[in-house]
Image (spheres, rainbow, N blue to C red):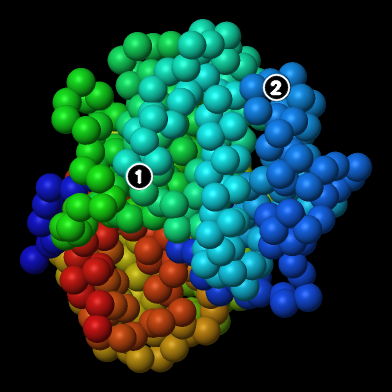
Amino acid sequence: QHPTNAEIEFVFLGKEAEAYRTEYRGQNLNNRSLDKNLKFHKNAIPFLPDGDCIDDVHKACTSNYDLIDKSQWCFQWLFPIHESSTDKNTQILQRHEKKTMIKAPDIMRRILISYRIMLGYFGVLLVDENSGRLERSNVYVERYETIRSKKNNRMRITRMLKFLGEVDLERLKLPFLVFFAREICMSELLADCRVFLERSWIPTLRRDEDLASCQRFLRDPSGPEPASVLTPSVPPRVEVVYLSSDLSRYRNHYPGEDINDQRLDHNVKFYMNLLPSRPHGELIDVIHERWWSDYDLLETHHGYIQWLFPIHEDGLNDEAQVLQRHEKETMSTSPDIIKRLVKSYRMMLEFYGVTLSSEETGELCRAQHFQERYANLNSKTHNNLRITRILKCLGEMGLERLKMPFLTFFVREIAGNGLLPACRASLERFWIPTLRHDEQLAACMRFLRASAR
């Protein structure tokens, strides 16, 4: 039985946003000999190079927008985060610094002053420190122009929001995002910032509930505001998925990319049994006849997978050709080619210890020799990349229906039965996101969570 859909919000994250939202899991970031950020916020040292202590910075920068424009490095001292910056004089925020800063009333007061100053620079006033409510300042027209025209200011906002989360001021983020969602989507005063709002600012919200409610509000900013982060928690209805750039391109059918050179037709000829794979390859019918069950050859030969499962991306085989759009159209509508492609799929499934029980439903089951093949799949992790390619190719060739049964089977084996632990990350980050329908993808992610042992 396949996973069913549920009412969800689906959010794609870039790599940096994912690292931030998971609090830089697996990274130490706690060198106790590093304390520049703490000392700066204690007003004990100036920022470098040739800067002032923080209290003097606050005095100099209040309403002095030209100075803020010129003080590129000062901003990174005011809002340090667990990521490197473009200034070699700054220091990555350390975990011990963050803990000390949160507990120090004087430091927290200075952080709020820094936030107010930057809001003023962006044309916004902090009306209520407790609720985080914002409104336009008297000079918002002029200041909004600096956000629109200078990309570095949009990047500054991302950094500022991340820092608020690090120092226990998460409550200020949602009011900030609600305010800018209205300015961007309703008033359209900052329409050029829509991409940053959606892809960089909103994903700084660390709670799935807040992220989901903000996404819904973004689609309809005329509706009720998202609930405050101070309200009681409700069960999250959002799946947060890291989507690599190549998967984003794939799911959106490679927008803006031509990939349609009519002179290139190697993939069609190969699947018509007219051209052998290269290097050291064979015609497709010969591969199916002689390579089937030759697991040593299928494991060690690294040039055939790009021919068996062509996609609109370069592979590691320079002698294989990127799938062209006209080839995809020809191949996906040819019964003989699709028959051969499904046979290639069956061959690789057997290599992985799995049998295609029904071509109609895509249902899979363990092969008799699954233990031996699972051991190989678990130890030879380059096969994870091969599987990603196979799934992408199925989608290109009109065989999207085979993906969900594949993924459901492997969710059960990996998350439910505790087998193939080395494939878990690839399943979640690369295999499941090849599903091109958001509803299926979200349902599969929920099934993965529900199946976890």
Does residue 199 appear left or right of residue 237 in this picture?
right
Q: Is residue 373 left or right of residue 400?
A: right
Front-lying residue, 34 or 130: 130
Badge 2 marks a residue whose secondary structure is loop
Q: Residue at x 32, y 78 (%)?
A: 414
In percent of the image, x 54 and y 54: which residue is there? Answer: 108
Numbered tag placed on residue 130 in the rendering: 1
Q: Position of residue 146 (x, y in %)?
A: 61, 17
For the N terminus, give its image quadrant.
bottom left
Q: Quadrant of residue 387?
A: bottom left
* Residue drawn where x is 53% and y is 44% of the image: 112
Tell me which numbered mark, 1 or 2, is placed earlier along the sequence: 2
Furthest-top residue in view?
Answer: 141
**Residue 145 sits above or below residue 418 on the image:** above
Kindly identify the residue that appears in the image at 38 percent across and 18 percent down. Answer: 183
Instruction: Give how far across and how far down residue 332 sits, in percent.
Output: 33, 37
Vertical position of residue 371 compared to residue 94: above or below: below
Q: Quadrant of the C terminus?
A: bottom left
Tell how many labels: 2
- At label 2, the amino acid type is Asn
Identify the residue position indicated by label 2 in the image. 64
Seen in the image, is 348 located left or right of residue 43? left
Q: CA distance from mark 1 to mark 2?
A: 26 Å
Mark 1: few, some, or many residues within 10 Å (few <14, many ≥20)?
A: few
- Indicate whether 175 appears above or below 205: above
> Which amino acid does the dot numbered 1 rest on?
Asn
- Contact (Cβ within 8 Å) of mark 1 with mark 2: no
Where residue 401 sits in the image (x, y, percent)?
A: 21, 50
Disc sitting over residue 452 in the figure: none
